[in-house]
Amino acid sequence: MVNVRDAVLEALHRGPVSGPALARELGVSRTAVWKAIELLRREGYSIEGEPRRGYVLAGHDLLSPYEIRRGLGTAVLGREVVCLEEVGSTNDLAKIRAAEGAAEGLVVVAAVQREGRGRLGRTWRSPEGGVWLSVLLRPRLEPSRAPILALAAGVAVARSLKGLYGLDARLKWPNDVLIGGRKIAGILTEMGAELGRLDYVVVGVGVNADFGLEALPAGLRERATTLREEVGGPISRLALVRRILEELERAYEEALEPGLLDEYKGLSATLGKMVRVVTGDATLQGKAVDVDRDGALIIERGDGLVRALYGECVHLDTPP
């Protein structure tokens, strides 16, 4: 049986359509078409009725499973899409679904996160207008190699910002995306493992997209930026979500290839700088000289090279 709502929406995307013609095409009543139109309007679509043209769908930026999947150029990511107006954390929901057996490629998107977080449990401000999403992966990797996926996600976001807006995005180890030295996006990867076997990895991506700096806490405005500020106009979150998913799938496929790591190094804002990395109880300080195949930062000190697989990295030669 035809899903009238979905069929009407697909017809509207193709161009203006009259109610009677659409009713005949779908084999339903004009009333059924009208009810579908009203339902779509309540969902947020702007649909006008114009003489001699019929119903016309205006431009929109609605984040819905249908809109995200429509024209999405991926094979795996986006097989299932969950869109919410508000959630505590997209990563937390994706982890719950992972534990329930959800398949690789699940995408969770939220308009607002109440409890968004970054590294070390720090709060991540997630206001309306941003892109807040998490992707469930089930890679065949040793748990020790999982951090390479954070680097792959950083490359994917940098590619997206370059491709859509021409922005020269740079990557601060391990998972910050910078424009002109200011943070525009962050990545948080969390994994589940049993008996030394990696069960899943959730890749969370947060992008300061379609809002101004005034939406951020005053203390962050000197160190952060947004796409709207950088581009100088409104941002389509829908286009950005699709592009990130496409680039993330490509980077995921390339994660274990030398070319991906080389690309990450070429985009790095950390290599060559003096850094301080806090990893649990240890503090490592020196010059960042390399990133290895597992995603660890190699730091040169007076007593030789040390390796940081995770931690909070501060660029010591960058003004606060």
Image (cartoon, rainbow, N blue to C red):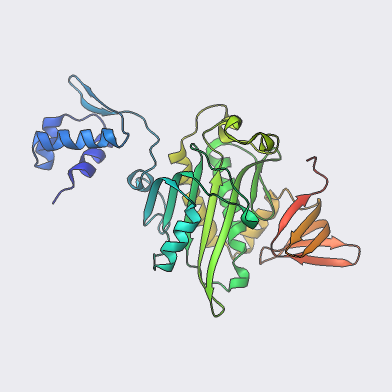
Q: In the displayed structure, would residue 39 be above or below residue 308?
A: above
Extreme residue in the right direction:
302
Give the residue displayed 13% in from the left and 42% down from the top: 26
* Residue 77 as seen in the image, left or right of residue 186: left
- Foreground pick, 126 / 317: 126
Q: Quadrant of the C terminus?
A: top right
Give the residue displayed 18% in from the left and 47% down from the top: 3
Q: Position of residue 12 (x, y in %)?
A: 25, 34
Give the residue displayed 54% in from the left and 44% down from the top: 160
The quadrant holding residue 282 is bottom right
* Residue 318 as seen in the image, left or right of residue 145: right
Q: Position of residue 315 (x, y in %)?
A: 78, 49
Extreme residue in the top direction:
51
- Foreground pick, 161 / 176: 176
Number of labels in the image equals: 0
- Foreground pick, 6 / 40: 40
Q: In the displayed structure, would residue 288 be above or below residue 130?
A: below
The quadrant holding residue 174 is bottom right
Q: Position of residue 157 (x, y in %)?
A: 57, 48
- Foreground pick, 3 / 70: 3
Q: Position of residue 311 (x, y in %)?
A: 70, 59
